[in-house]
Amino acid sequence: MIRLQTEPFEPGALLTGFCAGRNETGAVVSFTGIARASSGAVRTLELEAYPGFTDVEIGRMAEAARERFALQDLIIVHRIGAIAPGEAIVFVATAAAHRREAFEAADQLMDYLKSRAPFWKKETGPDGSRWIEPTERDLADAERWDRD
Amino acid sequence: MARVLLFGRLGDIAGWRERSVDPLPATLSALRALIGAEDARLAEALAAPGVQAAVDKVLARGEVALATAAEVAFLPPMSGG
């Protein structure tokens, strides 16, 4: 399931729901990303998506990961709109027969979401607003998965 | 007629994020020139490296004929979530 939403979400509830009723899943790995205040430099984060494009691109990527890591299931919930520091911004969970696949798939999905997913991100703080682009680290992280 | 959408910094620079263009120019580069014609800062931002376009929600590679397009979006470098 892939969902973009403006409302806050509770990661624990998502994980509980995702784990429920699984008899053949040996491993669930989850990741929760939380908006950082960066020592007061960020008061609000604003995330813009292109409905009908962003969700489709993420879906394409999710399907590739599902195949590559033989996932049984996955969930991606991503906030859009205004997000305050301390709020969860992204939740990813993967289910597989064994832990290695579940870990690696979650890792790859997050690297993709952090640097290549079609979002535009603006930080507003005491010194005004600025649009953010992926860091060198984010780009290098995503490239790890292109090699094999 | 088509809807033209600007995302991220492009929308801030232009002061609009969506407008109708009628008639729609024949090609992507002609549309880029049209919306940049009245706004030098926007023209410069549209020409910046990494700015992509999507025609009817499909990423355009290079020059594209717009013909029956209903929606064209200009996308600055994506920042991820």
Image (cartoon, rainbow, N blue to C red):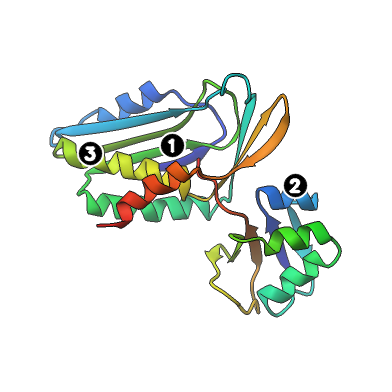
The lab-note entry on whether marks 1 and 2 share a chain reads no
The image quadrant of residue A98 is top left
Report crowding for label 2: few under 14, some 14 to 19, many 20 or more residues within 10 A (C-alpha): few
Please say if B67 is above or below A59: below
Tell me what residue is drawn at x 40 percent, y 52 percent: A59
Asked whether A123 or A141 is in front, the reply is A141
Across and down, in percent, residue A117 comes to 47, 49
Q: Amino acid at mark 3?
A: Ala
Which secondary structure, mark 3? helix
Considering every residue shown, the one lying at the far front of the view is A136
Please, which chain is the residue tagged with disc 2 on?
A: B
Please, which chain is the residue tagged with disc 1 on?
A: A
| Residue A51 placement, left or right of B15 | left
Asked whether A110 or B57 is in front, the reply is A110
Please say if B33 is above or below A64: below
Across and down, in percent, residue A94 comes to 28, 38
Q: Which residue is mark 2?
A: B12
The lab-note entry on whether marks 1 and 3 share a chain reads yes
Q: Quadrant of the N terminus of chain A?
A: top left
Which secondary structure, mark 1? strand
Asked whether A37 or B1 is in front, the reply is A37
The image quadrant of residue B76 is bottom right
Q: Which residue is mark 1?
A: A77
How far, Cα to Cα, is label 3 from label 2?
A: 40 Å
Across and down, in percent, residue A97 comes to 14, 39
Q: Nearer the viewer, mark 1 or mark 3?
A: 3
